[in-house]
Amino acid sequence: MIEAAFEALALIIQPSRLAFVFLGTGIGMVIGTLPGLGGAVGMAILLPFVFGMDPISGVALLMGMSAVTTTSDSFPSILLGVPGTSGSQATIMDGYPMAQKGQGSRALGAAFTSSIIGGVFGAFLLVLSLAIARPLILALGSPELFMLSLLGLSAVAVLVRGAPTSGLLGGAMGLMLGTIGFAPATPEIRYFINEWTYLLDGVSVAIVALALFAVPEIIDLLVARRSVTRAEYLEATKNENLTRGLFEGVKDTFANLSLVFRSASIGTGIGFAPGLGGSVVDWITYGAAKQSIKGNTFGEGDVRGVIAPESANNAKEGGGLIPTLLFGIPGSASMAILLGGFLLLNIQPGPTMLTTNLPLTLSIVWTLVIANIAAGLLCFAITKPVSRIVTIPMSKLAPFLLVIMTIAVYQSSRTYGDIGVFLGIGIVAWFIKQIGIPRPPVMIGFVLSGPLERYLHISMSRYGWAWLTRPGVVILGLVIVAIVLVAIKQSTTRSSTLVVLSAGEDVKAGTEGGQE
Amino acid sequence: MSGAEPADETEVVPIRMGSREWTRLVVQIIIIGVLAVALVQALELRELARYFPVFAASLGIVAGIFGIITDQIRYRRGIPAPQPSIGEATLFVPVQASRWTEAPFVRALRYIGWLLLIGLLLSQFTIAQVAPFFVAAFMLIEARVAWWRAPIYGGAAWLLVWFLSVQIGLPTP
């Protein structure tokens, strides 16, 4: 393992590949600072560009971007009370009050330092889990992998915000979208709408990802005229000594190292569980820190309220990679898109990631480490100029994003059909967002439709219906049924729903405070 | 305040079907209908190509029907329709629009129109021809920049396309 780790390091530090890590890191930082555009959107924008790249460079670009959006999202969260990504909602609770008190740079210093430590710690836990998971995953057969994929889809579908039945409906929509084109097991064309030959090869994952996540956010940001109050930001920070404040934040983090590691461990664990990552990781660690620290002033500008969620949301990337790499089960929307990227790069997640593709897997770990350190240091360096980016209204960014996205989707098959399908799915995605059908399950269903059908086909061919009686399959089946039933019951219970709503209202209050 | 809290928790005020709830219901029915058509079409396929779409469409139809039922239970218990999992929805946010053109739905349609416009233009012209005019027009109409700044943004868009297509070598539409 150690030899493979050094081999992977040698692969990733080649200048051309390191350049892709830094390119991804730079893009991820910009995307993280733009409110409403998170890792999933960034991943979707980059995905078409990895066509034709060598696997290590392509994954370095995607992971470099994905790993750092949760570092730079601290800028809008702390300075403006607007969550940069869904993983930085809880940072607002204490970061924004600190900024209002003129301690924004101290909060940023603490956020960046805890992000670096949390991200590296998450990567370390990923390596540990690889060693432990290796014998386990090699023992799994196609029936169990089918059920695990179904478990991943069900968990994400029922645990994302919203009604679980809507999540399942979204997941089924994604599965159906994935069945368009030639069937894998037989030469038959499915859903050959109007005999449009473009559909023969199915819809590209890059187009679906970009259409599902980027288009609805851009339309909504335009409709809401989302921009940030430059005057308010300047008012809150004009009297700050930037360097001294940042340094104080670094000191705060090192004074609370046990909190950093505790939160990062929770973050990695949550990232590992499909469907729990993203928007809940920061709230769970924030809540745990609030309960465990006596005499805290959480909610009024306590720096520990920044350290806890920021350590966790970077560490969760390492945890989220475990099921994605080892089982081919994405735990979140961005991991689903990353999984799509693997398919574009001809990388097959699963047991081979621990055998023939082990150097590639470890290169991902190194990318996480390098990207987290680079992003943290870069954030320190460019705090002042980058914070201005968040003041650009979407009406000025949108046309450029549209041009870039149009070129991006065109890389899929280089026909006009790419653009037509992109716009069509994007508009539908905006509609389903408005009525509360979650989009991550659609994406995960789409990405998993291929593996699910393949595992089901192999299971049926090899075992007939007898695969349904295998112990692992029965246990996983019961877990799926239990998760779905409990989630449906909870979604129709007033008390549990109100807790979620009140948490959301807190965020909204912070958000409104930072808007025009 | 503390005396009122228990009453608030036990008192259930059913939610009346508003525009968001009705739209959600109609869209769910449409999706179920589309899945039903897909299911019927899948049944005509050969066995090996059939079983997976049949499974997926059936799952969607069952989830959709359960969704409609659980929504009604939620509303009766005073629980609102779910919010988006990522970002914030704008369509049903009550706003005091000074003109009907400023209503969220109309504004959303306008931006969807811009999307369709770039799609339509690209069916006839190249991105290098379309991008400068599209960006300049968007900036002028939506971002309301000064007229003399719009061509500058258009030029920046052309430079962006040139960089991606010539310098990086990406195929462009």
Image (cartoon, helix red, strand yellow):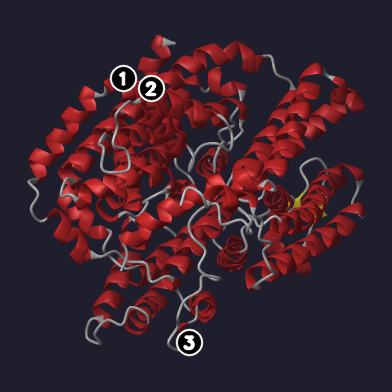
The amino acid pointed to by label 1 is: Ser
Q: How many marks?
A: 3
Relative to B17, A56 lies left or right = left
Q: Which one is in front, B79 or A13?
A: B79
Question: Could you say which disc has been placed on residue A262 in the image?
Answer: 2
> At 32% from the left edge and 64% from the top edge, which residue is drawn?
A515
Callout 3 secondary element = helix
User: Residue A383 placed where, x, y %?
Assistant: 18, 48
Residues under labels 1 and 3: Cα distance? Answer: 54 Å
Residue A412 falls in which quadrant of the image? Answer: bottom right
The amino acid pointed to by label 2 is: Arg
Residue A247 versus residue A388 in the image, above or below: above
Q: Quadrant of the N terminus of chain A?
A: top left
Q: Which residue is mark 1?
A: A258
Chain to which mark 3 belongs:
B
Question: Could you say which disc has been placed on residue B101 in the image?
Answer: 3
Q: Are marks 2 and 1 on the same chain?
A: yes
